[in-house]
Image (tube, grey):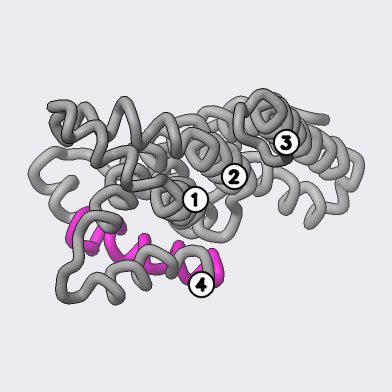
Amino acid sequence: MIQWQPIILSVQVAGLSLIFVTIFGVLFAAMMRKGNFWGKNALEAIFALPLVLPPVVTGFLLLLLVGKNGPIGYLLSEHFHTKIIFTPYAAVLAGTVVAFPLMYHSMKAAFQSVDTSLEDAARTLGANEWKVFWTVTMPLAWTGLVAGMVLSFSRALGEFGATIMVAGNIPGKTQTIPLAIYFAAESNDLTTAGIYVMIISVLTFLLIFGMNIWAQARFKTWPFRGGY
């Protein structure tokens, strides 16, 4: 019997993760584009780790941080009398961490494609850095932002390994669609697992399909799309 709670929770987790990923992805991509400091390459390598490490490894590292005996987990428990581990917030944390590299690299590529002469022109007209960023840089990098958001949301929606490590599989509380699929298949309930697979596949397909349609329409209306 299919339950709607994993579907609702997955969308909520992916949505909240997307908010954090967008904020920090844009922020760090902008900072790394402008800055040239010692340790920059090492920091970028750290940003990319969740993309290349097995999700279970990422989840284990998060568990060391936010678990009962971890530095963050201990701080929250002792001083705020709360915890993240085995709560929906842990699922949001896992989704944010694994999806962050997709947003960061999408925005990094988008910012690098921006013509700096246009930004310089805005500065010569009296615009400060904040205004240049929001009126010149971001509009030119908009396509990269949308692509990063779609990919990040889809990645957070389908996260399994890190989520099960820090949030567990608590029906009605932390069970997301990927977890429901795994445990339904493990109990030989292939019908329920198949329905969940179809739902998450359709959701992801519609997101990517919509992004492709949007990008194609934007390209057609762009005034300098090539040709003579």
Q: Quadrant of the C terminus?
A: top right
For label 2, the crowd category at 10 Å Cα-Cα, with few meaning under 14, some 14 to 19 and many 20 or more, is: many
Nearer to us of marks 1 and 2 is 1
Q: Check whether the beta carbons of the residues at disc 3 and disc 2 lie within 8 A of each other.
A: no
Look at mark 4 in the image and give the residue it sits on. 53
Q: CA distance from mark 1 to mark 4?
A: 19 Å
Which amino acid, mark 2? Leu
Which amino acid, mark 1? Ser
Q: Residue 209: image x %, image y %?
A: 76, 34
Q: Which residues are magenta?
A: 54-73
Residue found at x 22% / y 39%: 82
Residue 175 in view here: no
Look at mark 1 in the image and give the residue it sits on. 106
Viewer-nearest residue: 191 or 120 = 120
Which amino acid, mark 3? Asn
Q: Check whether the beta carbons of the residues at disc 4 and disc 3 lie within 8 A of each other.
A: no
Nearer to us of marks 4 and 3 is 3
Q: Earlier in the sequence, mark 3 or mark 2?
A: 2
Q: CA distance from mark 3 to mark 2?
A: 12 Å
Viewer-nearest residue: 202 or 40 = 40
Residue 76 placement, left or right of 161: left
Residue 20 in view here: yes
Nearer to us of marks 3 and 2 is 3
Q: Check whether the beta carbons of the residues at disc 1 and disc 2 lie within 8 A of each other.
A: yes
Residue 33, numbered circle: none
Q: Check whether the beta carbons of the residues at disc 4 and disc 2 lie within 8 A of each other.
A: no
Look at mark 2 in the image and give the residue it sits on. 151
Q: CA distance from mark 1 to mark 2?
A: 9 Å
SS at badge 1? helix
Nearer to us of marks 4 and 2 is 2
